[in-house]
Structure formats: C-alpha cells, structure tokens
Amino acid sequence: MSAQRDSSFAALCDTPAFDVVVVGGGINGIGVYRELALQGLRVLLVERHDFCSGCSAAPSRMIHGGLRYLENGEFDLVRESLAERDALLANAPHFVRPLPTTVPVTSVFSGTLNGVTAFFGSSGKPASRGALPIKLGLSLYDWVTRKRRVLPRHVFRGKQATRRRWPALTDRLRFSATYYDAWISHPERLGLELILDTARDAPESVALNYAELTPKGAGYQLRDRLSGQTYDITSRALVNATGAWLDESVALIAPDGGPQEKMVSGTKGSHLILENPALLAALDGHMIYFENDDGRICIVFPYLGKVLAGSTDIRVETATRVRCEPAERDYILSSLQLVFPAIGINADQIVFSYSGIRPLPKSDLDFTGRISRGHSIKRLAGTTPQFCMVGGKWTTFRAFAEQTADAVLQELGHGRCQDTQNRTIGGGAGFEQDGLPLIAELSQTYGITDARAKHLVDLYGTRARAVLDYCAGQTKDQPLLTDCPYTTAEIAFLATREHVTALSDIILRRTDIAITGQVSIPLIARIAAVLAQELHWSDRETQQQQQALVAELQSFHGLSFDAPPQPS
C-alpha cells in the first residue's frame, strides 16, 4: 500500500464526519466531488474499483456539442455541450484539442423531416441525413457559438473538392461538410488530475478508490477492499454517481431504501483501435462522421498515432462489465468499408478494443440513438438525503457536477464561493501553443530528447516538470524497454503520487500503454517489478497482479499473448 493511501485512511480515523459522501468515482462523481470540496465542504469520494475505470474509461473520446441532438430537439443540451466543450479546450488544453470533423453526404433532401417526426413522438430510426438537414444543423451549431466563437465555422464542399482532399472516400458521396468539435487524448488522466487538484485546493476532503460503502445505523461503513478493514463514518448528504449501476446501488447505500422505478436505461458502446497506416493517412487529420446502413452514427479519427473507430449502441437490461463482442467488431469494421471501400481493413489490425455502458435516462424509445444524452438530478428523501445523478456524458461533466453541487448546497444551507467554469485542470495550467514552448524548455533544462519531452508533455502537460524533477532525483532512471517512451522512475512517480494500487491502474488508465498497442509480457513484467518495489508487493502478489492484468486484457480488450507472465 502506498503512503498516499495510508494517509487517506488515516484522515478517516482522525475525522470520520463528512458533509457529503459521493459514491462513484467516474467523471461525474469526480466532478461533483471537486465542486463541493471547493465550496469549503468536507467531502468523501468512494469508488469501488479504480477512478474512471467504468463507463468513464470507455467514451468515444470526443468532446462535442452533439450535432445529432439537434435532430431530437435537444437545443438546450447542444447549447450546454458547446459551452462545456469550449471550456475544456481552455481549461485542459493538454488533453482536449480541436478536431476537424467531416461528414460525407450522399443525398440532398433525405432526413429533412427527422426533427419533425421526433417532435411528434417518433421513436424509430431516422431517415438518412442529406445535404439540406446537415447544412441546417451545422448552421445552427455555428449560430449557438456566434458570440464566443472558439473554433472555425463549418464549410460545405462539392464532390470534386471532397475527392481531391479525401481520394479514398466512397464514390457514393455527393457533398461533404466539415465542422469543428474536439477530442480528448487521456480521459482517465483528466479525471485523476481533478482529484489531484482537489487534494491540493481542499486538503480536508478525501478520495478513495478500491473501497465500498454500506449503510450502518444512522451513518455508513466504509470498507477498504484491499485490506478488508472497515471504518465508520457519517455524512449530512449523499450523492449517488454510480452511472449505469444507479438503480442497483441506490437502495444498497441508502438506509431508508430507494424508489422502485428505474432511472437508468443503459446502452452498450464498443470501440476499436486499429494499426492501419493507409486508413490513418486517408483521414488526413480529420474525423469522418458518417451513417451506417442501420442509421447509427459511426466515427473514425486519428488517435495517438492509431485509428479509433466506433461505435455500437445496444440496449442492455443489467449493468455489468462488458467487452466488444465479435458481432460488434464486425459491425464496426464493415462500417469503415462503407466509407473507405478501397482500403484494406480487417480484424488483424486491431490492437485494442473497449466497451462500456452509457448511463442514459430511462427510455422506451425503439431506436437507441434517439434516447436523450441529457442529465438530471433526483433527490431521494431519507435520514441522509440522497441525490442521484441520472444520465450525463463526458463533455458536460462539469455542468452536471455544478448543478448537482448547487442542489446539495441548497439542501445544506451552504453558499457557493467558487466557480469552476474557467478553472484550469491539472497540467493545463500555463499550457500554451500546443505545448511546443514547454517541449523546448524541458529538452534544454533537463537535457532530454525532444521525443522524450513530447511524450511527457502529451501525458502530463505542465505537470511534466514535476515528473522530471522526481526522475532527476532517482539514482537510476532508464527506459522500461528499448524504444519504450516510459521510464522506471516515471512509473515510480505514478505509483506513489496517483492513487495506484493495481498493475491495471498503470497499464490501462495512468498511461496509454494498452490502448496504443504497446503492451507486451516483458513490459508488463518490468512495470510490475517497479510497482512491487514502490508498493511493497510480495513475489506472490506481484505474480498475481500480472496474471490478473493479462486475464483482463484478454477477456475485455481483445488482446492475446504468446506466453504467460513469468516471475519478475
């Protein structure tokens, strides 16, 4: 166990009374934890697994206004999403960057009445979107941001101009439209940086992963899932941010029980990461945003030197951990062939896959794409009032957290004293010009290569200085493996300062090792050896950690390995 974790549990023993407990350490839970802690309340965040390890680790990695939400008449959601997109571009520029997005258009008038049919209650699949409705939608998109424009306006092209720019696109297109949204490189790290910022700015609050909460008398019992030790705590209010698990958890953590009606209607979304240089080149830096034959919107865009493609949208009745099934893999691959028919695309090019359950508001709509991506707060009365966060998406996490926090503050009679709309996040503070000045600074100051500096800036932003200061203080720092951008001291820094308790925390969430196809048995063993030293693992635990990680990568991310992990 790390000293960081020891300190968190010591704080529970010293002062077991909290103003608010937030259950669920995904991005919505982390967001409301930060909001409330910054208002001077003492807040406890409890996550059963690792932070941002559920649905928050499985987004499309888009930070967007929601162009297609206009079709559902969700104008307020689009307005809010665009404002939050622009805020993230400003507050987390080391992770969130502009993404030019191009829509291939194969017809003119088709889909013009989709919004009308939705208004009159249609729950079925919308018609294919032609040039006219896309033009109207993008014009409205631009109009919403007219007074605070951050990104360029949209551009329409004819077939010839489109083919000149993207010669590999399908011959079926008649037009194309390009507009701008944004993408996020490391969503799990952004969530973690919110926690680290809160520890700095509101040190009385506590965030714990691998812990669970159950009611006990008029309060709660918190159990450390690693040691089994329990702690009695009290709280004046509780926020339930368990996402897709909301309906299951609401009664378990409320001493007075919960409602009978369902609040969440989850859909499963799967994505692929491909190593396909021809496809990467054909994208020319753009996301291609297109319709599959079933009316589902699909995406493909450059991602950390690879290609990210998705996604599915399958209704699920029970929240559980999910994986990209063979049928979903084939669905995504076949969708890519629709837009890039001349490029060879196959399953052998997949280096990683992931899947999650979107915690959407309960809905009986037939076509899952019409289910709202909006959010709401439901207050449940009891000895300790419980505020349930229903719905939500990555782009709007801050706004949702702010609204939830305001409801809790009103309940407790506590005023708001800080706003987060313009508050920088982690390594986004002082980050300028895509990090180029910082790369030059680090190379000169620390005597490292530009490639090493760029790796650190991409992963940590301006926090890269702290990482390098730590590495410089270690007697021996070297690459984990030849040509690996990560070093032994860098992994030790993460292990001791970023709430790491398992090997999977590093491989899957603190780094991009797994999602970019870098993971291997030798690399797993090398990282496990560093963690064993820093977290005081026995030889047996080190081996178990490796075996558990390999099983997870095989079962949930489609990876295969030639040899089992050996003792390090």
Image: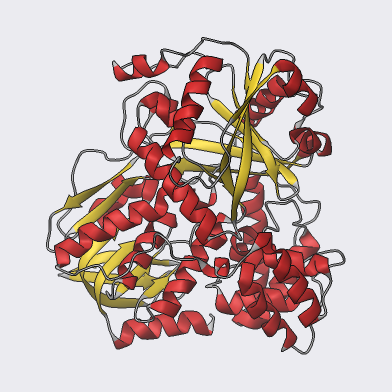
Could you say which is closer to the camera, residue 155 or residue 550? Answer: 155
User: Residue extending furthest front?
Assistant: 147
State which quadrant residue 416 falls in.
bottom left
Image location (x, y in percent) of residue 342:
81, 21
Report the number of discs.
0
Q: Is residue 499 left or right of residue 351?
A: left
Image location (x, y in percent) of residue 147:
43, 44
State which quadrant residue 279 falls in.
top right
Residue at the (19%, 41%) spot, across then down: 260
Image quadrant in which the C terminus is located: bottom right
Q: Is residue 164 left or right of residue 413?
A: right
Residue 539 visible: no
Query: Is residue 32 placed above or below 462 in the rendered structure?
Result: above
Could you say which is closer to the camera, residue 139 or residue 187? Answer: 139
Residue 220 visible: yes
Could you say which is closer to the camera, residue 207 or residue 444? Answer: 444
User: Residue extending furthest right?
Assistant: 482
Image location (x, y in percent) of residue 497:
56, 78
The colour scheme used here is secondary structure
Q: Is residue 402 left or right of residue 2?
A: left
Residue at the (38%, 34%) spot, across then down: 317
Query: Is residue 532 placed above or below 271 in the rendered structure?
Result: below
Query: Is residue 563 placed above or below 247 in the rendered structure?
Result: below
Image location (x, y in percent) of residue 363:
31, 30
Residue at the (44%, 85%) spot, across then down: 7
Query: Is residue 226 placed above or below 295 in the rendered structure?
Result: below
State which quadrant residue 12 falls in.
bottom left
